């Protein structure tokens, strides 16, 4: 959320690494941020307002998994500002919301129960946490089939981030993940195609190897 209670699409908490400008997104207005250009991997583009990004996604019939990022300090009113602007749009188009901030997840789910809302977990130590979330988004190096089975018993989906090669995607499929967050869509397509061609015995062997 920006200084003037608008929203932009931006990953980092600091502007400098990608834009060269000092400060944070929440310390700048929407007008200031959308004049900045992001540079990474020889690519560049202006910071997008979330209004424009959401409108384009809807035009393309592309559902979004929207992460609400929060600064290290409390940001009172963030959830209410976000839902005032986007709740009806998100519900109408079937977008989903997630956050690393447990309080944000619970607040969104309480205020807008129709929105599919997820809790992002950087690590899995003891299994699914107690949450009203509809799904968990879990980092792949600590995920296992037991976590996914436990989540499914609670009727919660599990998305895994970030398997970026075919073998990793296969492993998540055999664990029972409901989806993956990835930078490599080709690997997902290849894994799905190969999975359809595998015999049951092959899938079982791969699953057992994956657990080990």
Image: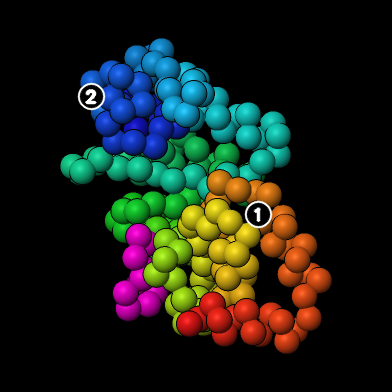
Q: Quadrant of residue 63?
A: top right
Nearer-N-terminus badge (1/2): 2
Q: Quadrant of residue 175?
A: bottom right
- Residue drawn at (42%, 17%) of the image: 37
In the rendered structure, which segment of residues is drawn in magenta?
121-131
- Residue drawn at (46%, 60%) of the image: 137
> Tag 2, which secondary structure?
loop
For label 1, the crowd category at 10 Å Cα-Cα, with few meaning under 14, some 14 to 19 and many 20 or more, is some
* Along the line of sight, the residue nearer the viewer: 29 or 150: 150
**Residue 41 x/y as whole percent:** 47, 29
Disc 1 from disc 2: Cα separation: 37 Å
**Residue 148 x/y as whole percent:** 50, 76
Farthest left residue in view: 73
The residue tagged 1 is: 187
Q: Is residue 113 visible?
A: no
User: Are circles 1 and 2 on residues that touch, CB within 8 Å?
Assistant: no
The residue tagged 2 is: 23
Residue 123 is a magenta residue: yes
- Residue drawn at (18%, 42%) of the image: 73
């Amino acid at each position: 959320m920006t200084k003037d209670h608008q929203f932009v699409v931006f990953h980092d908490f600091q502007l400098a690494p990608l834009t060269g400008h000092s400060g944070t997104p929440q310390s700048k207005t929407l007008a200031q941020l959308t004049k900045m250009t992001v540079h990474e991997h020889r690519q560049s583009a202006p910071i997008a307002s979330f209004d424009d990004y959401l409108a384009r996604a809807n035009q393309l019939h592309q559902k979004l998994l929207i992460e609400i990022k929060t600064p290290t300090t409390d940001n009172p009113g963030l959830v209410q500002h976000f839902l005032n602007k986007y709740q009806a749009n998100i519900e109408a188009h079937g977008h989903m919301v997630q956050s690393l901030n447990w309080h944000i997840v619970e607040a969104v789910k309480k205020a807008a129960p129709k929105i599919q809302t997820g809790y992002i977990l950087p690590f899995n130590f003891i299994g699914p946490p107690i949450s009203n979330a509809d799904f968990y988004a879990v980092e792949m190096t600590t995920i296992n089939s037991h976590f996914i089975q436990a989540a499914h018993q609670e009727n919660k989906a599990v998305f895994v981030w970030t398997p970026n090669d075919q073998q990793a995607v296969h492993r998540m499929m055999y664990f029972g993940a409901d989806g993956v967050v990835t930078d490599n869509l080709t690997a997902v397509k290849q894994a799905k195609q190969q999975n359809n061609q595998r015999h049951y015995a092959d899938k079982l062997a791969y699953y057992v190897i994956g657990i080990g």
